[in-house]
Amino acid sequence: MSHKSWMKTVPTENCDVLMTLPDTTDDHTLLWLLNHIRLGIPELIIQIRHHKHTRVYALFVTATYESLLRGADEIGLRKPVKAEFGGGTRSFSCEEDYIYENIENELHFFTSQERQNIIRYWLENLRAKQGEMLHNIHFLEGQPIIPELAARGILQQVFPIHEQRILNRLMKSWVQAICEPQPLDEICEYFGVKIAMYFAWLGFYTSAMVYPAVFGSLLYTFTENDQTSRDVCCVVFAIFNVIWSTLFLEEWKRRGAEFAYKWGTLDTPAESIEEPRPQFQGVKRISPVTNAEEFYYPPWKRLLFQCLVSLPVCLFCLSFVFLAMLGCFELQVRMPSAPQRASERNG
């Protein structure tokens, strides 16, 4: 079942994330999932639909504005601050919500990408309690429920819903626009910082490639055909590339820092203090560094897996490649070349 088919056949105005279940889903599984989401994440609003042609269930997920504000505070979402309070960006706080721009506007304070990120964070961090099970699935204490159900095929897909109005605007100002600057701010608001930063780098790299292309074309045009002129041309072009690549890297560092500051990711926390990925499994403990509760996987288990699985597999593959290479050399030695075979026949 394609995403577009769901959007066209089951239109829902208030929806940020769509979750689909196969047509073989029984009532017990559906009710179990609904109860766990509603009890574990009371901030979410869920509408259940059933597609009459494919008999596939779908959960349309959204949240109220007040719940999204609490979620933004929970994940530390950075939002622009009003000029009278210092400007710039700051991690959102419900206690000081009055200092942020457009806080009074429920429709425009959060972008669709920010709303979906908050809801995805809640869904991926819905964790099981001790002894919980669904059919033959036995959950570990603290194990993420949604990723496990997706891995077992109980959940078919979990994906965000596009806004056709914004897509049409981006189609005109970005895809169909020729020789015009990219709308990077609009890309960042809709697709997120990572996608916007990638296209910012891609546009900067494409523009910077004009200089070596033009310089190389001029050298090729005016260089004479003798070997000395070609050698001098190669040396000059190599020196130019060294200077160009250095300037390119330094300029991108400055440009990337500008985008990072503008989009509020310049001083984001390091990965070491961020939430672990939902698929990570381990035992709960108090971190000796941050004094916060975290999931811990013993290093000896990781080392045991490396020694008993990873290392033997790598050694086997290396040995196989080495033996195959020796076999090729042996075949080359044993099989005479074509001139030798011809001389033997003539002799």
Image: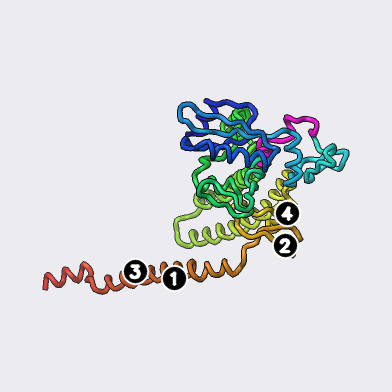
Amino acid found under the numbered disc labelled 2: Ser
> Between tags 2 and 4, which lies in front?
2
Please report whichever mark, 2 or 1, sits nearer to the chain's N-terminal start.
2
Residue at horizontal 59 percent and vertical 60 percent from the top: 239
Which image quadrant is residue 189 in? top right
Please report whichever mark, 2 or 4, sits nearer to the chain's N-terminal start.
4
**Does dot 2 land on a helix, a strand or a loop?**
loop
Amino acid found under the numbered disc labelled 4: Pro
> Between tags 2 and 3, which lies in front?
2
Colour scheme: rainbow
Question: What residue sits right under mark 2 in the picture?
Answer: 287
The residue range painted magenta reads: 102-118
**Height in image: 290 above or below 217?**
below
Q: Is residue 219 magenta?
A: no
> Between tags 3 and 1, which lies in front?
1
Mark 1 crowd level (few <14, some 14–19, many ≥20, 10 Å Cα): few
Question: What is the spatial separation of the Cα atoms under label 2 and label 4, in whole angstroms?
Answer: 17 Å
Please report whichever mark, 3 or 4, sits nearer to the chain's N-terminal start.
4
Question: What residue sits right under mark 4 in the picture?
Answer: 269
Mark 4 crowd level (few <14, some 14–19, many ≥20, 10 Å Cα): few
Q: Give the numbered dot on residue 315.
A: 1
**Does dot 4 land on a helix, a strand or a loop?**
loop
Question: What residue sits right under mark 3 in the picture?
Answer: 324
**Height in image: 13 above or below 263?**
above
Question: What is the spatial separation of the Cα atoms under label 2 and label 3, in whole angstroms?
Answer: 49 Å
Question: What is the spatial separation of the Cα atoms under label 1 and label 4, in whole angstroms?
Answer: 38 Å
Which image quadrant is residue 69 in? top right
Q: In which quarter of the image is the C terminus?
A: bottom left
Q: Is residue 298 visible?
A: yes
Residue at horizontal 78 percent and vertical 46 percent from the top: 91
Mark 3 crowd level (few <14, some 14–19, many ≥20, 10 Å Cα): few
**Does dot 3 land on a helix, a strand or a loop?**
helix
